[in-house]
Every structure is written in structure tokens, then in C-alpha cells.
Image (cartoon, rainbow, N blue to C red):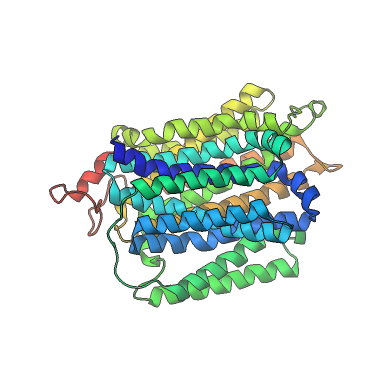
Amino acid sequence: MSRSGFGIIGAPVLFIGVLQTMEMTLSPALPLIQRELAASPEALAWIFTGSLISSAISTPIVGRLADMYDKRRLLLTLMAITSAGVLLTALAPNVTVLIAGMAVEGVWLGMLPLTVGLFRDTLEPEQAATGNGLVIGVAALASALGLILAGPISAALGYRWLFILALAGALVAALWAWFVVPATPRAAAGRVDWAGGLLLGGGLALLMLGLTTASSWGWTAPATLALFTAAALTLGLWAVIELRSADPLVDLRLLAGRTPAGVTTMGFVFGFASFGLVVALPMMLAAPVETGYGLGADILWIGIYMFPMGVAGTVIAPLVGPMSRLLGRRAVLVLGSGLVCAGTAMLAFWHSSPWEIVAGVTIMGLGGSIGLTAALNAVAADVPADRAAGVSGVVFVAKSIGGTFGAQLGAMVLAAGSVAGVPTESSFVDTYLLSAGLGLLAVGAAFVIPSAVRQAKGVGVVSAPATKPAAAHSDTL
């Protein structure tokens, strides 16, 4: 990889890794936050809910802005807004300010679709595919690393240092980006569909709020049903307006194509499987040995058990491009989806010893990283250049929705199978099997995606030399 290519990839990847690590350290640190800020359990839940809703709203909008404007300027703006949110959380005198800071910080997820477009515009196809892989791999590694670092940092320095260290890392990434990321040409004419963004953001906010509060309010409670109904009506109105718009925020007709539809489905399923697993596995690992299935692990050891999932994802992701050239794009998509199913199924049947846990999470880490990286590469190859970042944004929103739904449904399964408030072994098995069964949808979606790059107007790497045909992009996928 050239020096310039390393710099363009490194800055956003570092930023994504830092923010993902910070968010994963918060869950183990919640008792410290509650004690210092005198926060209620309901208020603590909003620390994550606010960030989740903010991410769902901002990601598709950032994706569309990335399709239309200079990606360098948008990248630096997003880094500045996110850093301001992290600073606010570090200095928060009460939980209300902390929640507000997390809501501002949550816009960082828009960095994911932005990087897909940035790499496509500024890098050679081989480097762009490697960059997509590193984004997915480092995000997976950061998730596991956060669980390991949370306890030692918060215990030794206090929970505020989780934000201070993240802010320092974010500023380093922003400075790096300032010097190495080049400006990009405007890929699309037209205007930003702010009305569509308002409706989409409102609909997604209502949906995510309903999903995150359903476990406490009840899925059939009037308030929960009202949120879901309002979400359905808002998103339905948004869809009608988008289909009539000459310049929609999200091109629904394009999204219905085989590649966008298949990749979006895979994103939802991977989100469901991974977050459903994150709910169940730490609880099972922390259960006392006397239960017959628990390992009595503390927070540090839970992170250590799950760390191989991140390492596996980081190592394999940059190799997805060469694998696709060797095996074919569809084979790699099916392989990734199949490994996600296999990893969660293994945990259902083999979880009595540490090596069985490590084997299961490693296989799942490999599958998720392979599948999602190959899916993003498919978007970059098949979707017109002026819509690639926008479609990628929809994929990540689908992954967030799938993760939220998976976490809530997983918690319901565990609660239903509890005896005296303690989940039984069979309830954990049911949770893993549910994730594995849904993973079969990702396998089916992989077969929907065309096996070869389509020849379509506007498809290609816009920064490629004029002498290079757009079809050359297929060599990396």
C-alpha cells in the first residue's frame, strides 16, 4: 500500500476504533457513573438510547451528504462535532448533560458510510477494498478491547478518563486527517432532501425508542404500541414522499435492487446476531460455576473471552478482497454468513469450557467481518458513485436496528427462561439458536446479490484514471 493510501485509510480507521472502544467501555463503568452523578437506572439507559437514536438519524443523512459534497470537509466536520460531544460528556456535571453529550457524540457512526465513499473516490480499487476491511475489522477489535480496558481505566483513574482518552485519540485522528486526506470532487448535483431527512430521522427515532423501551414498558403496553404505530406512519409517509421526489435522500428504487437489498438484509441479520450474542454471552460467562454452565468470570475475563472475536475480525477483513478474487464474490458472502450461523450454533451446543467459548466467538468474528466487508465491497462495485455512501449508510442503520432488536429479543428469551431471576442454561441455548436461525436469512441474502459486478452507468471508481475501465473494479471483489 502506498504511503498516501495508508494515511487516507489510517485517519478515519483510528477515529472509528477510538469511538467504538469508548462506547464499549461505558457499560462496565455504569455503576461508577450512577454513583458519582446520582443517576437513576432509567436515566442511565438514556446514555445509550440517546446515542443510538442520534446514530440512526445522522447516518443516512451523512451518507447522502457524502454522495454530494467534498468528503474531506465532511470528514473533518464530523470529527469536530463528535469530539465536541465527547468533551461534553467528559465535563458533564450531571447525567442530563452526559446524555446530551452522548447524543452529540452518536453522530460518529456516519463515519462508516462516509469512509466507503472516501476510499472509493481517493484510492485504487485494491486499496479501497483493504480500507473497507480495516474499518470493519478495527471496529470489531475495538468492541472487544473496550471490554478489557473499561475496568482497569475506570478503577484507576475514574470513569471520566474513558472520555478524556477517547477525546485525545479523536483529536490525533482529526489532525492526521487534516494533513493527509485530500479533497474529493462533488459526485452528485442537486440538493439535500431535508424534508425526507426529517421524516426518516423522526421515524427511525420513534422505532429505536420503541425497541429500547419495550423491555421495561412491555411490548404490548399502550405507550410501546403508540411508538411503533407512529414510527410506521412516519416511515410510510417518508417512503411515499421519497418515491415522488426527483432527488430523494434515499433512492428507494435503487435500494430495491439485488445488491442493495441483499446487503441491507445481511446488515440487519449481522446486527441481530452479534448484539443478541453480546447480551447473552457475558451473562453466561459471569454466572457462578455452581450453575453448571457459568464460568464465574469478572468484567476483565469476560473481555478476554470475547477478545478473540475482535482479533479474528481484524486479521481476516483486509484479506476479503484477495479471497473474493480467488473464490468469487458470492462464495465469500455465503462463507461469511455461514460462519456467523456456525459460530452462534457452536455456542448453543458447546459452552462448558473456555476453549469452546473462544472457538465459537472466533468463528463468529471471522464470519461477521468477512460477510460485512464483502457486502460493502459489493455496494462500492455495483451502486452508482453518487449513491454508494448513501446506500452504505442504510446498511449500517439496518445493522443498528437489527442489533437493538436482537438485544431486546435476546433479553426477553433469557427472562422467560429464568428461575428465581437467574437464566437457565436452556434459555441461553435458545438465544444462540435464535441468532443462528436468523443467520440463515443472511445466507439467503448472499445468494440474492449478483455473483459478478454489474455493468451500469456511473459504476466505478470515480478517481480512477481515464484510461482505466470502470470494470477493473471487479478485480478486487
Residue 385 appears at what percent x and percent y?
Answer: 29, 57
Q: Confirm whether residue 38 shows in the render.
A: yes
Position of residue 162 in the picture relative to residue 138 (left or right): right
Q: Quadrant of residue 248?
A: bottom left
Residue 280 appears at what percent x and percent y?
Answer: 68, 40
Position of residue 380 in the picture relative to residue 195 (left or right): left
Q: Quadrant of residue 27?
A: top right
- State the quadrant of the C terminus: top left
> Height in image: 88 above or below 235?
above
Nearest to the observer: residue 138 or residue 231: 138
> Height in image: 416 above or below 293?
below
Nearest to the observer: residue 101 or residue 312: 101
Residue 339 appears at what percent x and percent y?
Answer: 49, 35
- State the quadrant of the N terminus: top left
Position of residue 449 in the picture relative to residue 408 (left or right): left
Q: Residue furthest right?
A: 420
- Image point (51%, 53%), residue name: 109
